[in-house]
Image: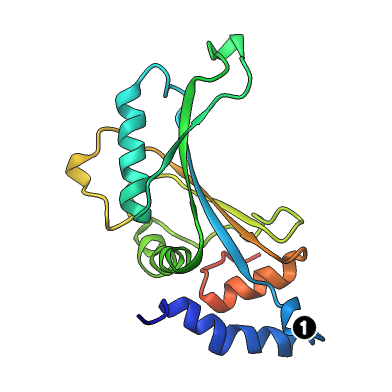
């Protein structure tokens, strides 16, 4: 079985380019993508279980992995929310599936966004992780538009082993992430 295209690109091109750019003393210092977390928050998930099931199926289709429901950790009376109620779903991708998802996101899904000008380069958290959102799940080719009851957004978090945003920014640029001009 062959390696995913972006993983092979990371090994052959990106890692050596980052070593040259940032002059690391050890190859272990090179930033590396550890996991990608996809999260769908459905505020009305407890009141509308069908929409939550639809979101679970959508995440499963996009990632090829079963999604899990997320539950409220605290009660908030203003939102009529009790601790333990289902409020969303999430999937954590690692390994080959993570690289395959990143490849589909960069090369297929993001170019399908209407009026796309690039992803926000300010989505870094100061710890070397990057967060972004897509407003509609229908940009992914795995989703059949006629079977969607409700359009919802997806939060995507890219977790790396680096603590420096500039290094991770360069890594994603080499992967082909279409950043908006700063």
Q: Does residue 50 sit above or below 138 in this rendering?
A: above
Residue drawn at (67%, 69%), measured in percent from left and top?
168
In x, y percent, where is residue 155? 51, 46
Residue at image position (19%, 40%) is 147
| Display colour scheme | rainbow
Which of the image's four quarters has the N terminus?
bottom left
Q: Is residue 151 visible?
A: no
**As drawn, which residue projects farthest toward the front?**
1
User: In front here: 159 or 181?
Assistant: 159
Outermost residue toward the right? 25
Q: Can residue 156 be seen in this view?
A: yes
Q: Nearer the viewer, residue 177 or 117?
A: 177
Image coordinates of residue 118 in percent, x first then y, are 51, 63
Q: What element carries label 1?
A: helix
User: In the picture shown, does residue 25 fall above or below 178?
Assistant: below
Camera-nearest residue between 35 and 115: 35
User: Residue 90: image x %, image y %?
Assistant: 47, 42
65 is higher (above) or lower (below) than 21:
above
Left or right, residue 6 beside residue 49? right
Determine which quarter of the picture holds residue 140: bottom left
Q: Residue at x 59, y 71 (%)?
A: 172
Residue named by callout 1: 22
* The residue positioned farthest toward the left in the image shown: 146
1 vs 91: above or below: below
């Amino acid at each position: 079985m062959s390696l995913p295209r972006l993983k092979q690109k990371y090994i052959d091109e990106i890692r050596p380019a980052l070593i040259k750019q940032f002059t690391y003393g050890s190859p272990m210092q090179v930033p590396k993508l550890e996991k990608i977390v996809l999260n769908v928050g459905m505020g009305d998930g407890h009141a509308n279980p069908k929409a939550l099931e639809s979101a679970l199926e959508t995440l499963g289709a996009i990632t090829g992995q079963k999604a899990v429901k997320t539950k409220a950790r605290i009660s908030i009376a203003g939102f009529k929310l009790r601790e333990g109620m289902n409020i969303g779903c999430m999937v954590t991708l690692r390994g080959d599936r993570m690289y395959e998802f990143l490849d589909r996101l960069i090369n297929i899904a993001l170019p399908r966004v209407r009026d796309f000008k690039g992803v926000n380069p300010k989505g870094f958290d100061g710890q070397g992780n990057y967060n972004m959102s897509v407003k509609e799940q229908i940009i992914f080719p795995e989703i059949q538009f006629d079977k969607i009851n409700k359009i919802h957004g997806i939060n995507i978090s890219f977790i790396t082993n680096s603590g420096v945003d500039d290094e991770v920014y360069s890594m994603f640029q080499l992967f082909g992430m279409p950043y908006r001009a700063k």
